[in-house]
Image (cartoon, helix red, strand yellow):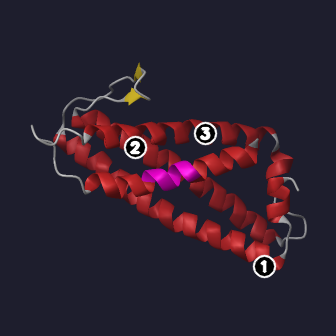
Amino acid sequence: MAPLIHALIAVGVFFVLISSWWMMALPLPSKVFTYRAFPFQLHKNVGITVVFLVAVLLYLRLRYVLAARTSLSAPPRMSRTAVVRNVLLYGLVLACCISGYLSSSYSGWRTRLWWLVDLPHWGYDNDDLNILYSDIHNWTTYSLLVVIAVHIGNVIYAAFRNEGTARRMLRL
């Protein structure tokens, strides 16, 4: 189950990153341009789904600790960096999503989860808090991009060293 959830999180994060550049390039809403709400709602829905998937993956990782360990042939330094990298990845994904939700809450726009359920509206229309949470959202996103690049680099490095990481993750 964990490899599938990992893949869904990766696709979700990739979609959210790409969609953010697309939706920010759209013209500001007006009487003529009302279509901007759909991409923002979709972006928020995928982000909230990613938070749910991260929570499930964290549960699986904590419940089955042995499956999350790095290979015994890897040097101890690699095991420690893998733990730090995973904590950073999970923490930054959660920080991105939570700060984005709070920014949206203080922008005055409500969030409907997949157009079915109205989520609690914690904030009110407050430009200062919206900008604060938006800035946090942006900086955690840039940090997440750096950590993802390191993560992908480590995967490629492990594949070239033939450590069996991909085999273990895919259960081959």
Residue 159 locus on image (x, y percent): 78, 73
In the rendered structure, which segment of residues is drawn in magenta?
11-16
User: Where does label 3 land, which residue?
Assistant: 53
Specify the amino acid type for callout 2: His
> Badges 1 and 3: C-beta atoms under 8 Å apart?
no
Farthest residue toward the left?
31
Residue 12 locus on image (x, y percent): 53, 48
Give the number of the mark in front: 3 or 2: 2
Residue 155 locus on image (x, y percent): 70, 69
- The quarter holding residue 2 reads top right
User: Where does label 2 land, which residue?
Assistant: 43
Horizontal side, residue 22 vs residue 14: left or right: left
Specify the amino acid type for callout 3: Leu
> Badges 2 and 1: C-beta atoms under 8 Å apart?
no
Q: CA distance from mark 2 to mark 1?
A: 35 Å
Horizontal side, residue 88 vs residue 107: left or right: right
